[in-house]
Image (cartoon, rainbow, N blue to C red):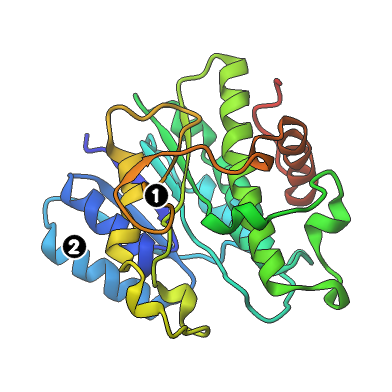
Amino acid sequence: MKPYAIITGASSGLGLESAKALAAKGFDLTLLARGEKRLLDAAKDIQTHNPEVSITPKVLDMSDFDQVKEFATSISRPVDVLMNNAGLMGPDFKLSKQGIETQMATNHLGHFALTAGLWAQLQKAADPRVISLSSVVHRRGNFNSASTEIVRGASESKYNRWQRYADSKLACLWFARELHNRITAEGGHCKSIAAHPGWAVTGLQENFPHVLDPFAQTAKQGAQSQIYAALDSDILSGDFIGPNLELWGKPKKIKGSKRSHDADAMAALWRTSEELTGVKFLTKR
């Protein structure tokens, strides 16, 4: 049986480049994204260039936990790689179907629910990996992860789009590290890895062009960290992968901010995430 990967936000940018790389390595893929046309076009292109693998597109809004849970129950084969890549960056204030600010709902909480829903299928793979996409701006993240009110972020009057983005990307890194801690506590074999692209121009920047964008990495270059996390043999659970020059460069193992290693904060975020998504897994800690 071919290895199998699920990639969220796979219709463009980092997710699309990751999908192309994994398909070229012989992975069957399920590609998830919100926009149907771009997703179907991407899946068709990847399938044309990789006829020996299976490419399955599925329209999915990661901020809607009902959709996420329904999708997860539809997967019956072992999952070798779950790439939690989908993200929003700095949108206008909006609440998800479950009443949660959409950046946190999409970037972190939807992936928490997806990972939980696919956990049994990940355990069936020989070397399963969960890859969580953070960002260099996790260094600006600063929020109380024990507060469901703060994590929910439902107050428009308190909404700062850029701080919220940084907080959501810190949440992604905390999730990856707490997932590693819980896997370790249970003696599991799944690897939890975080990655960030550095400075790369992708679809996230469409509404926020910058005069310096020509100096940024391309999406293909930015995706190398998460591709390395998915494929390289020297990757360990708990690793954080990013460009060797922080914003640019070849992927390497990095440490992240001091705050990103706060064990109490990451454990508190896990409990808050359980409450907000209504799902639990890896309860031993």
Residue 232: image location, x then y, percent: 28, 35
Check the picture and name the quadrant holding the N terminus.
Answer: top left
Toward the top, the furthest residue is 187
Q: Residue at x 56, y 48 (%)?
A: 114
Q: Is residue 208 left or right of residue 285?
A: left
The local secondary structure at tag 2 comes to helix
Q: Which residue is mark 1?
A: 6
Q: Is residue 144 above or below residue 99?
A: above
Q: Residue at x 29, y 60 (%)?
A: 221
Which class describes the residues within 10 Å of circle 1: few (<14), some (14-19), or many (20+)?
many
Q: Is residue 77 left or right of residue 131?
A: left
| Disc number placed over residue 276 in the picture, else none | none
Residue 272: image location, x then y, percent: 79, 44
Q: Which residue is mark 2?
A: 47
Q: Amino acid at mark 1?
A: Ile
Q: Is residue 273 above or below residue 152?
A: above
